[in-house]
Amino acid sequence: MKERKAKQALAIMVVGLLFLVACKKTVTQIVQSAPNNTNNTWQSLDAVNLIGANFYNSGCFNDSLFTLANGTCYFTMNVGKNGFSNAFFLTLLNVNDNLQATSAINFYNNYCIYYATNNTINILHIPYNNQFSQFIYVPNYTPGLNSIFSQLYYSPDQCFPVGSYPLNSGHYMLSPVETADYNTVRFDLVNLDTSFIGSPGLPTHPNMSSVKMVSVSPAAGTLPATSFYYCATFFNKFFVNFNSQLYRIDTLGNVKAFGYNPVTPTVANNFRFYNMFSIGNNLFINSYGNIFYSTDKGETWQQFNTISNYPNALSYIIFRTIDDKLYATMMGSNKLFIVGMNGNNFYLNELNNTGIPDNSRITSLTRVGKYFFVTTYNGVYYRDTAYVNQLKTPIH
């Protein structure tokens, strides 16, 4: 235990030094020219595509700041009515050399969260003046217990929302930490409002009084199975799929165990949730094309029907909510759909994706001002929102 604490302390010191150096040397300005005509095709965002091709996630802050990231850097760019300006990229600190899809950055509410080395999570606050401040979360372990500090299993073209460590609207983050017997698992619920108090440019560490330790156990009549972790947050609650079990955790630390799935808790049906989305106050879970929905913000669930006009692609469809519209992408593909609903059926209309290379894998969709952005493993592409919903011909 003493050796582990010593290693953690050394890691934290190294991170602090790296951050101070990086703040001085790695912020670089880039400029994007005025957008070309976007009526007929998606356009390449050359300002960032010239730097690197693989982009795993993106976000929008205050409807005018576009933020995106690859495995080593993240980028910010102001988006106005007539184009883009004042773009910067910043090297991510203390990242694993293999940081890719399985630990994609999560963006929310002016925060950037990513899994780093040495069992740490780095949390950056992104203000407009690019004076970045950082919070480093390193969990405390109980002597004799096993760490399960975990990363996301699916790559960002295979799931939504992206991010192993989501941050909700109340600025709470949830993280798996350790287990004793693979039945009881401890999570940390971290309140960033009381933890994240450092000066810009200086890494800080959590006030442990802001960390609530939450234990979860399988529902009655069920057992844990193969190790798997995914977490998403909606309506200020966290929904966790861990060891073939589904849990709901609120910001008070209250836990509801749903068992193997939210409708038939004791019946195993290969339930793994990797895609969650909301339409108004209705919440949906997509598990290999088996869709469940809740009308009470995730407390109780019902079985949804199906995707009516793409029955052979159910397990490959990823639903993604943008504003009040529902879009869908397909795993490992550059296909883009707008989704309609008819009773308890979704139906997909394929959109014009001309300009996005055929071998691209779409990883995120983001609207910023009047522009719509798509990140892929082959770069970033954009269109005027007025033309995004232009249907592909013929409609499949």
Image (spheres, rainbow, N blue to C red):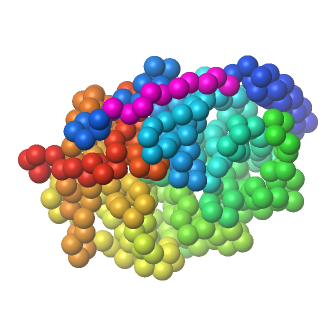
User: Magenta span covers which residues?
Assistant: 27-36
Residue 88 in the image, given as x and y percentages of width and height: 61, 29
Q: Nearer the viewer, residue 270 or 204?
A: 204
Which residue reaches farthest front?
A: 82
* Number of numbered labels in the structure image: 0
| Residue 176 in view | no
Which residue reaches farthest left?
A: 394
Residue 251 in the image, given as x and y percentages of width and height: 69, 68
Q: Nearer the viewer, residue 274 or 364?
A: 364
- Residue located 84% across and 36% down the image: 202
Residue 84 in the image, given as x and y percentages of width and height: 49, 36
Q: Nearer the viewer, residue 245 or 80?
A: 80
The quarter of the image holding the N terminus is: top right
Direction from residue 393 to residue 102 in the image, left or right: right
- Residue located 57% across and 31% down the image: 87
- Residue located 70% across and 49% down the image: 177
Direction from residue 146 to residue 109 in the image, left or right: left
Would you identify the image quadrant in which residue 189 lies?
A: bottom right
Direction from residue 276 to residue 216 in the image, left or right: right
Q: Nearer the viewer, residue 166 or 216?
A: 166
Residue 358 in the image, given as x and y percentages of width and height: 24, 30
| Residue 208 in view | yes
Give the vertical position of 301 relative to 114 (above or below). Answer: below
Say whether residue 153 is magenta.
Answer: no
Helix, strand or loop: magenta stretch = loop
Say whether residue 32 is magenta.
Answer: yes
